[in-house]
Image: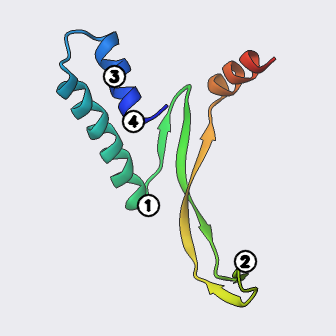
Amino acid sequence: MTKSELIARLAVRHPQFQGADAELAVKTILDAMIKTLATGGRIEIRGFGSFCLNYRPARMGRNPKSGEKVEVPAKHVPHFKAGKELREKVDYHQS
């Protein structure tokens, strides 16, 4: 599902929202999530999952095209861990 599909579903599900209202709601939520992760925070949505940052230390990588070694700097990457309810629903629908 894309951001625009999420906005469209929200607008259809809640007809009291105009398209612009649904777009603003989705944008506000995503911006708050981005700001929280960017400042090193953690996000937990009960029944859905949690978002946090994982640290990846610096390492030596390889350019796949030329084969030469390149240094990959240390970085933090977003990580999502699905909640129990989400895992159970996904597993149920896959069986």
The three-letter amino acid code for the residue at tag 2 is: Pro
Q: Secondary structure at mark 2?
A: loop
Question: Which of pointers 4 and 3 lies earlier in the amino acid sequence?
Answer: 4
* Tag 1 secondary structure: loop
Give the answer, above or below, for where 91 lies relative to 54. Answer: above
Q: Distance of mark 1 from mark 2, alpha carbons?
A: 32 Å
Q: Amino acid at mark 4?
A: Lys
The mark that comes first in sequence, 3 or 1, is: 3
> What's the CA distance linking mark 2 and mark 4?
32 Å
Q: Position of residue 44 (x, y in %)?
A: 49, 38
Q: Is residue 91 above or below residue 63?
A: above
Return the residue at label 3. 8
How many numbered marks are there?
4
Disc 1 or 2, which lies upstream in sequence?
1
Q: Which residue is mark 4?
A: 3
Q: Amino acid at mark 1?
A: Gly
**Residue linked to disc 1:** 40
Q: Position of residue 12 (x, y in %)?
A: 32, 12
Q: Earlier in the sequence, mark 2 or mark 4?
A: 4
- Mark 1 is surrounded, within 10 Å at the Cα level, by few (under 14), some (14 to 19) or many (20 or more) other residues, namely few
Q: Amino acid at mark 3?
A: Ala
